[in-house]
Amino acid sequence: MKRNTVFLMVVMALLPFYVWAAQPNVVIIITDDQSWDSLGYMGGDVHTPRIDRMAREGLIFSDANVTSTVCSPSRYSFLTGRYAGRGQGPRLKIEHPEGTQTQLENICELEKDGWNVAKALQGSGYTTGFVGKAHLINQEWLEKANWASAGLKTYPDDGDPRDPAVNEMMRFNHGKWCEAIKQYGFDYADGIYGANLKELGNKELFVHNLDWSVSKAHTFIEDNCDKPFFLYFSTTLHHGPAPWAQPGGKFVYGLDADPRMTGEGFVEEGFDVMPSRKSVFKRNAAAGKGRDKAFALWLDDGVGSILDKIREMGIERDTLVIFVSDHGSWRHGKTTLHEYGIKVPLVMYWPGVIAAGSKYDEIVANIDFAPTILDVCGVKAAGDYYMDGVSLKGVIGGSSAPVRRSLFGEVGHSRCVKTKDWKYIAIRYPKEVQDRINLGRKFGNFEGHPPMDRPYLTRNGHLGYYASRSNPHYWETDQLYDLRKGVEEDVNLTGKYPEVMTEMKRLLSRHLDSFQKRPFGEFTAYSDPGYEVKRMPEMSHDKVE
């Protein structure tokens, strides 16, 4: 065989894995509160064949992170590419005016006049879609007491969605949510949950309905398969109420619930876009898993249904699919900066472009999604579109080189910096809170538990209570962990490695100094009155250029 012929054959064999369409489609599938134990490919005792296949045939990220471990700030970073602490949404600015320390949690909102990845794509010829859980806009709408003033219709908590009058109000409110989300860069919005299920304000609707959400994704893909599109799909699974709750208890919230109860009220005709719920139990049992694990297979079916629709439309090789969680489970590290909170499952799947069996072991984060998507889609960000993240386009193409030296994290009263080998977590309180601590005054606890010497990191006492029980070093103001020892972080090494500690504090200060007029104890040049200002020496930028 001639040398030129051999060369051509090699090129043709490799070409599909390094060249993609000029304007590929992108689908992000974001799950909620999902840790490793509800995914088979990560070692969970569950049956998740479709997601496991994605992992085998796609690109696994072993050190994927979110930079804040509650819903709103994490999702903000996914869509903007910015740390949530930079947010300029109305609720965050009301809670934390400029010059005060942020207690970051579910008070983050997209900015109407600011950039996000959907708005940038929309301006470059992409059709953009939003399906599922938002928790990103109009935080005041989540409180039923504000519905009337917001133009929403108020129905009783115990109202029957089968009642046409009640159901009309539910559909009206859902329509209002859809129209509101479109203002942030989305051409299509449907199947919307304003936040979690309880915010629907009705006992009958307090159930997960993945079938309903997936049906809306199908509609968007079918209607837009002949042009470049971006779809943000966000399911309520596996957030509470517990989708694994079994019949016999007071309530059921998942597979055993009425499949016609949705975020837009009662839908008589139901949905036929996924395998039947009865078959979920049968296949789960056949795989040797307990009935309480069937919820994981249900989610797996939803992911598989979206993948099947993409294949059915003939656009599989033109579509990058990303599967990721917004943060770890409340059972582990949610509302903390420990590894079980910030590390999340992440798989990218793109037949013909991403080589099967790929794995990337360096640090990536949710702030990297927006720059990656714009880069892959060939869209240049506007000059005033600021992003903290870096593009992972090279990683998708097969690079194993690191893209950053360190990563910043923030939630509640805590901040962290993480490198490949080490993590440092600092807890610092605003002056008024620290003064109360110094005076020995007590803080309220969760559900009647005794008053505490310090407040939880976040305002949400429920999440703080469980997070503090799951993480033995939760209250310690300075924490240093050797990540080479594993993700458990059960030994605080503060005081053991002074040189490492000094370096990590410098790195943290470098990150914090980039937040204008946001004090954090001694780490920032701009500090609350009463704190000693201690500027750390300058460090090199964390991104690898």
Image (cartoon, rainbow, N blue to C red):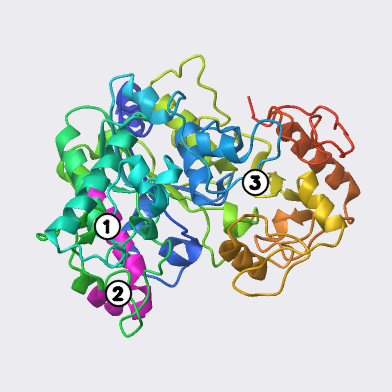
The residue depicted at 48 percent of the width and 28 percent of the height is 371
Q: Which residue is mark 2?
A: 284
- The boundaries of the magenta stretch are 281-308
Residue 279 placement, left or right of 253: left
Q: Secondary structure at mark 1?
A: loop
Residue 472 placement, left or right of 289: right
Of callouts 3 and 2, which one flags the residue occurring earlier in the amino acid sequence?
3
What's the mark number on residue 408? Answer: none
What's the mark number on residue 103? Answer: 3
Whole-number angstrom distance, CA of label 3 to CA of label 1 = 33 Å
The residue depicted at 48 percent of the width and 38 percent of the height is 109
Q: Quadrant of residue 273?
A: bottom left
Mark 1 in CB contact with mark 2 (< 8 angstroms): no
Whole-number angstrom distance, CA of label 1 to CA of label 2 = 38 Å
Residue 187 placement, left or right of 98: left
Is residue 118 placed above or below 247 in the rendered structure? above
Crowding around mark 3 (Cα neighbors within 10 Å: few <14, some 14 to 19, many 20+) is many
Q: Secondary structure at mark 3?
A: loop
Instruction: Give the x, y percent position of residue 243.
Output: 36, 69
